[in-house]
Amino acid sequence: MMKTHSKLAAVALMAVGSLTLSGCSLPIPNIGISDIQAGVEDLQNLAEGATQFSESDLMYAQMMIPHHEQAVAMAELAPTRTSNADVLAIAKKIKSAQAPEIAVMAAWLGGEVSELAGGHEGHGMEMKGMLTGAQFDELKNSVDAKFDELFVKGMIAHHEGAIEMTKSILKSENVIVRKFGEKVVKDQTAELKTLEAIL
């Protein structure tokens, strides 16, 4: 079992480390091998045994990986820009949930995450709720109450977009993909409530 975990972790690390989508430049979060190994361990049943994917399943993974990456990058800003305990707590929770999910989706794709025709759109799916480069820079350059406001509002839109995107796999014929989608919706819906309470 550990051999399988190590293989998936290696594939996921390679994929996450080389993400480049045509027409966009996204902040790459600090996702280390320990995060990925923990993610594969925690989400083992969602990463192993899934071999048959529809075009929609794979498109979802390709779109959601950079979407998750930006959320993690946003969360990583919090410790050096705010002392708000609520914001710090939700940022930590978001990173700990989404970094492992990136690893799982990368494992589904076998490390091939770099080829996505059409930038942010494909087969009727778009990356909803993403910050623009200017918005991310504004967040990165803010502190204290301003950071808190931009972070919470930005993350609410980010989560709403992710939930909307995830609807595309909730009826997937691949039960593993479907369960992954259910987990994403459940987790992010709960986090939305926390974010809205902070706001």
Image: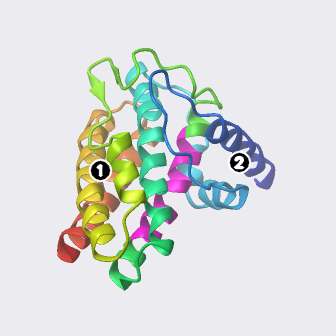
Which type of secondary structure does the marked residue at label 1 adopt? helix
| Quarter location, residue 142 | bottom left
The C terminus is located in which quarter? bottom left
Q: CA distance from mark 1 to mark 2?
A: 26 Å
Dot 1 amino acid type: His
108 left or right of 136?
right
Indicate whether residue 102 is drawn in magenta. Answer: yes
Could you say where residue 69 lies in the image, as x and y percent from the top left? 49, 47
The majority secondary structure of the magenta stretch comes to helix
Category of crowding for the residue at label 1, using alpha-carbon neighbours closer than 10 angstroms: few (below 14), some (14–19), many (at least 20): many
Indicate whether residue 25 is drawn in magenta. Answer: no
Which residues make up the magenta segment? Answer: 91-105
Q: Earlier in the sequence, mark 1 or mark 2?
A: 2
Give the residue at x 75% y 43%.
Answer: 10
Could you say where residue 112 lies in the image, as x and y percent from the top left? 62, 26
Could you say where residue 129 lies in the image, as x and y percent from the top left? 27, 44
The circle drawn on residue 9 is: 2
Whether label 1 touches label 2, CB < 8 Å:
no
The circle drawn on residue 158 is: 1
Which type of secondary structure does the marked residue at label 2 adopt? helix
Q: Nearer the viewer, residue 114 or 133?
A: 133
Q: Is residue 145 above or below residue 56?
A: below
Q: Residue furthest front?
A: 141
Number of marks present in the image shown = 2
Dot in front, 1 or 2: 1
Q: Residue furthest right?
A: 3
